[in-house]
Amino acid sequence: MLSQDQFAALAAQGHNRIPVVREVLSDLDTPLSVYLKLVDGPFAYLFESVEGGARWGRYSIIGLPARCVIRIHGKRLIVTEEGETVVDRSVADPLAEISKIKSQYRVPQIEGLPKFAGGLVGYFGYECASYIEPKVRADAKPDALRMPDICLMLAEELAVFDNLKGKLYLIVNADPADPRAYARALRRLDSLVHRLRSTSAAYPDAVDTQAIDESHFVSSFPKGDYLAAVAKAKEHVFAGDVFQVQLSQRL
């Protein structure tokens, strides 16, 4: 674990987020049990990796609930912190804005940790193609679900399993601009360790499945419209405009 002097030295080098790490014994825990013990809110995640299609990757990463969430709707940027909107404005280039936000964070690589020990996590939707290729029009159809085209969480607290070494690391990325950041990070790590040791994983009950009556199913993509879309897709393929088309509907 970093000492306070090492923390100060990294801050002096210009890093504005510094991972403070605690290694804990995890013989009886799994990534799922740690997720269930530590995650108590939205905007969290569990990343498992597989190599070669069959072999587990080295790291399993649990992101604890993010305080900062970045959303892009079309060309509208919305940033929330602790659930409160702090930015809501139009932008000319959404991808450039994401790069600008990312570039604000300077994090050192700590030996023994995976390359990812915090940062932006989320998704870029298909509609982002219109940001890259001007000829691709953004979908003008009504969006009943109002899903963001981009949604990214700023992951600053994580639990990382090193499946090779059999170790669990708790990570809090501290902001050295706060003179009490190091002490706060240690207290937060103490709290997470206490929850790991004193909390039982609350596994959800089995889902009570019911038979689906297809007679009540309503499609948002009627059969006639679907067949017309297939015909149109074929025309574009034959014309050389595209080589693949995926037709889909939201459920």
Image (spheres, rainbow, N blue to C red):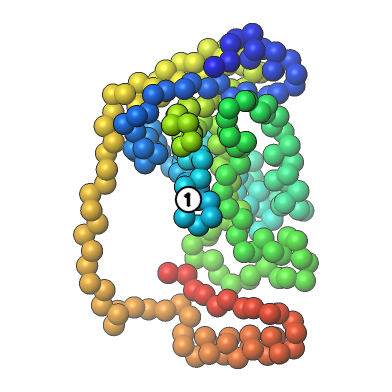
Query: Around disc 1, counting alpha carbons within 10 Å, would you say few (fewer than 14), some (14 to 19), or many (20 or more)?
Result: few
Q: In the figure, is residue 73 to the left or right of 196?
A: right
Q: Is residue 65 visible?
A: no
Q: What amino acid is at disc 1?
A: Arg
Q: What residue is at 74 percent from the left and 82 percent from the top?
A: 241
Q: What residue is at 53 percent from the left and 58 percent from the top?
A: 147
- Look at the picture and state if 128 lies above or below 85: below
Horizontal and vertical percent for residue 69?
A: 56, 42
Q: In the figure, is residue 28 to the left or right of 77?
A: left
Q: In the figure, is residue 92 to the left or right of 199?
A: right
Q: Nearer the viewer, residue 99 or 18?
A: 18
Q: In the figure, is residue 85 to the left or right of 219?
A: right
Disc 1 secondary structure class: strand
- Look at the picture and state if 91 lies above or below 237: above
Q: Quadrant of the N terminus?
A: top right
Q: Quadrant of the C terminus?
A: bottom left
- Look at the picture and state if 7 lies above or below 112: above
Q: Is residue 12 visible?
A: yes
Horizontal and vertical percent for residue 29?
A: 34, 33
Q: What residue is at 62 percent from the left and 36 percent from the top?
A: 115
Horizontal and vertical percent for residue 100?
A: 74, 41
Horizontal and vertical percent for residue 104?
A: 72, 33
Q: What residue is at 45 percent from the left and 29 percent from the top?
A: 167
Name the residue carrying label 1.
55
Q: Nearer the viewer, residue 174 or 58?
A: 58
Q: Would you identify the image quadrant in which residue 246 lies? A: bottom right
